[in-house]
């Protein structure tokens, strides 16, 4: 029979109590359920046990992969997103030059203006950010529930746009180009050691590069063990109504 | 953002009745646009006197006198009925089995405040007493399980906690007032529940006769041994089994125990008993039962923890711990609440939700029902639409709003989808609430974007 190496990235490894002879196994398990931190893992002398160390490295590897991977364009194509790219040429430049990840070439700006719906009530943007996996894992569910919600509320929804090599501030440029009332951007969060699939949603009323960062309302931690994408989507539909009604967003808005 | 709500607890026991008012703080921590809402503080602001439960005669509670007592307490506390946001009236022990108990609850719950729930049921009572006594809180710090026995006049309510969670809850026909004495120490009452036990033990105890201290001690010692058997996880005698109400316990071996209820006062104090005068302080055998338990606990491999509240444990549990709050992303409709006593239709398998709703709906003819299920931790939008479609189809023809209660965090998504697909019918969809088939729920008005919910198991089954 063929032997396989165990997959150390499996979640059950994370749930395992590695303390030798714990006073109460039940309590260790209960404690572990309350946090993603690596507790109740025991030790070998003064250091981690091999299993803990390997798991740590595996999680770190996921974080590295996340940053260096690409959004599955089949997903954005299927959902009908219009695809553009910032001034950044490749991943390395994306990491080194955050400033270029916030702006577009003049041709790109013109193309947006020419090809996309003008003056929508709601403009939706998907951005890769620091985690392509976050978009792959969450985009379809969150976008679909929001779209149905906006249509039902009678809002006009702009052409959905996917931005490659994007930082958060691209939403201001797109909002300015199209004259959107509420702009909503999905973006992959900087990965941690707990997950590489966490996504944030930034939203702003009349988003503008002239306004401070505090113009944005944010929902973060969207992934399967955080806030489920459908639930975040439902909350954003609700928040959009608030933004439209109050005509403001971010810290100015008391929710 | 911090909001405070006033809560009332009313406990109508076999022997005594009391009222407390507490202030519950609900805090909303909004780091992002999805706030984290928690109950952060519970402060008891008023404790009533402890009254003898007014009875017209054996078996009938005096509703009028009870109303007067409670009205006077509201006045003394300076609290108006309109200010009460939530709370619970709990009718406990043997009182719950009185003829007019259901009427009493109905009358009092309207009288005490809009969203004050009437509740009874030995298991729920056990859990509330355990919270009120402080056993639940203490269990979070203990490495092992802890049991709390709340010994009242007619019944004992027991709950096992581990790490703040309920592991088991049950009740027994053991109490301080199963035998009553007059001033001449003559026996005036022996509860039906223990007549078989008295016979098995061969005790000479008869109504009208002067009580014999040694005979009484034999009885209370037998009760004390039962508490030990249960705590130590030993095999139970037949006599002990007979005293369980509705169902047996799960049989854990325990190291930590706590006592609350009126009898507990005599477990923790040093009151010595040498004569019938020492026993007959309240016209019953409560002090003797406490003394017997205290005596039997010596040299046992059990750690006795002091309860934070003894005689008031149940009322505090009812007033401060009966309330749950929903998750913070939900769909509510404050125009149709408070909703009281909605029977829970619990779905076993969400794949066959529509059929289950149709099949079980007829169990609650003419009643507004709440559909409940656990659901997946992170459902897809496709799954959400499937759930909504099944609920709408299952409830077709029912003249009621959609009321759905789920465990995992997706109520806003499901609620919005329901609203969309059902054409803007009224919807309440709440999450982070666990229920079982047979439970009833009450739903209150939203506070800081969360919805107060009370989940209860009623004793009064038809």
Image: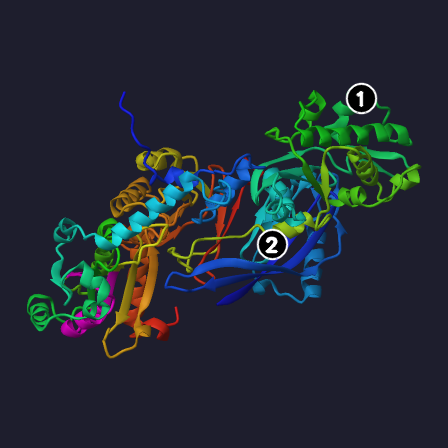
- Where residue B106 sits in the image (x, y, percent)? 58, 49
Q: Are marks 2 and 1 on the same chain?
A: yes
- The image's mark for residue B320 is 2
Judge whether B57 appears above or below A108 on screen: above
Residue closest to the far front? A45
Tell me, yes or no, whether the highlighted magenta stretch contains residue A183: yes
Is residue B104 among the parts visible in the rendering?
no
**Inter-mark Cα distance, 2 to 1:** 41 Å
- Where residue B147 sits in the image (x, y, percent)? 65, 38
- Element on which disc 1 rests: helix
Name the residue nearer the viewer: B99 or A181: A181
- Element on which disc 2 rests: helix
Q: Quadrant of residue A80?
A: bottom left
Q: Earlier in the sequence, mark 2 or mark 1?
A: 1
- Where residue A181 sits in the image (x, y, percent)? 22, 72
Q: Quadrant of residue A3?
A: top left
Please name the residue shown 47% across and 48% down the image.
Answer: A34
Name the residue nearer the viewer: B436 or B189: B436
- The image's mark for residue B408 is none
Question: What segment is highlighted magenta in the picture?
Answer: A160-186
Tell me, yes or no, whether the highlighted magenta stretch contains residue B33: no
Query: Which image quadrant: the C terminus of chain B?
Result: top right
Q: As drawn, is B452 to the left or to the right of B223?
A: left
Write down the chain letter for disc 2.
B
Q: Which residue is mark 1?
A: B201
């Amino acid at each position: 029979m063929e032997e396989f190496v165990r997959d150390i990235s499996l979640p059950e490894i994370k749930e395992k109590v590695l303390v030798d002879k714990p006073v109460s196994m039940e309590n260790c398990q209960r404690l572990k359920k309350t946090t993603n931190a690596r507790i109740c893992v025991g030790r070998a002398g003064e250091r981690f046990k091999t299993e803990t160390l390997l798991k740590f490295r595996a999680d770190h590897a996921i974080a590295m992969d996340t940053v260096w991977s690409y959004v599955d364009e089949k997903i954005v194509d299927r959902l009908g997103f219009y695809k553009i790219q910032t001034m950044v040429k490749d991943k390395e430049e994306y990491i080194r030059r955050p400033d270029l990840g916030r702006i577009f070439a003049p041709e790109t700006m013109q193309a947006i203006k020419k090809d996309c719906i003008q003056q929508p009530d709601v403009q939706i943007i998907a951005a890769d950010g620091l985690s392509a996996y976050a978009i792959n894992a969450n985009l379809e569910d969150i976008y679909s529930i929001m779209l149905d919600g906006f249509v039902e509320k009678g809002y006009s929804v702009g052409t959905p746009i996917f931005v490659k090599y994007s930082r958060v501030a691209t939403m201001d440029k797109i909002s300015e180009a199209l004259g959107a009332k509420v702009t909503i951007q999905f973006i992959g969060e900087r990965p941690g050691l707990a997950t590489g699939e966490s996504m944030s949603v930034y939203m702003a009323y009349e988003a503008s590069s002239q306004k401070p960062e505090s113009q944005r309302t944010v929902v973060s931690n969207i992934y399967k063990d955080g806030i489920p994408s459908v639930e975040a989507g439902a909350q954003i539909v609700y928040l959009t109504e608030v933004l439209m009604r109050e005509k403001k967003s971010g810290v100015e808005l008391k929710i | 953002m911090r909001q405070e709500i006033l809560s009332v607890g009313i406990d109508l026991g076999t022997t005594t009745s009391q009222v407390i008012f507490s202030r519950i703080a609900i805090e909303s921590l909004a780091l992002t646009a999805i706030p984290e809402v928690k109950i952060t503080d519970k402060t008891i602001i008023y404790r009533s006197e402890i009254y003898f439960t007014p009875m017209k005669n054996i078996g009938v509670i005096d509703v009028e006198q009870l109303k007067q007592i409670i009205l006077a307490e509201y006045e003394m506390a300076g609290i108006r009925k309109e200010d009460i946001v939530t709370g619970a009236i709990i009718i406990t022990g043997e009182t719950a089995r009185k003829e007019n108990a259901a009427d009493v609850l109905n009358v009092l719950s309207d009288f005490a405040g809009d969203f004050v729930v009437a509740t009874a049921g030995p298991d729920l009572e056990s859990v509330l007493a355990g919270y009120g006594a402080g056993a639940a809180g203490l269990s979070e710090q203990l490495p092992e399980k802890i049991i709390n026995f709340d010994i009242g006049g007619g019944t004992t309510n027991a709950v096992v906690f581990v790490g703040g969670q309920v592991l088991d809850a049950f009740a027994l026909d053991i109490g301080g007032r199963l035998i009553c004495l007059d001033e001449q120490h003559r026996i005036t009452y022996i509860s039906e529940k223990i007549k078989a036990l008295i016979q098995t033990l061969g005790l000479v105890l008869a109504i009208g006769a002067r009580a014999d201290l040694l005979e009484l001690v034999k009885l209370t010692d037998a009760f004390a041994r039962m508490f030990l058997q249960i705590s130590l996880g030993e095999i139970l005698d037949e006599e002990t089994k007979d005293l369980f109400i509705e169902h047996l316990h799960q049989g854990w071996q325990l190291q930590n125990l706590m006592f609350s209820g009126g009898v507990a006062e005599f477990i923790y104090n040093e009151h010595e008993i040498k004569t019938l005068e020492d026993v007959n302080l309240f016209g019953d055998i409560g002090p003797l039962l406490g003394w017997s338990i205290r005596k039997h606990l010596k040299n046992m491999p059990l750690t006795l923890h002091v309860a934070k509240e003894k005689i008031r444990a149940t009322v505090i549990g009812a007033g401060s711990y009966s309330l749950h709050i929903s998750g913070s992303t939900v769909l509510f409709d404050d125009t149709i609440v408070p909703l009281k006593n909605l029977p829970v239709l619990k779905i076993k398998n969400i794949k066959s939700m529509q059929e289950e709703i149709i099949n079980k709906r007829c169990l609650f003819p003419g009643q507004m029902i709440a559909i409940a299920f656990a659901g997946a931790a992170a459902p897809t939008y496709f799954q959400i639409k499937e759930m909504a479609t099944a609920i709408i189809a299952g409830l077709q023809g029912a003249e009621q709003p959609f009321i759905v209660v789920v465990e995992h965090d997706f109520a806003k998504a499901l609620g919005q989808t329901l609203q969309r697909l059902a054409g803007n019918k009224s919807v309440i969809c709440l999450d982070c609430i666990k229920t079982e088939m047979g439970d009833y729920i009450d739903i209150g008005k939203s506070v800081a974007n969360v919805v107060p919910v009370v989940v209860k198991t009623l004793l009064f089954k038809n």
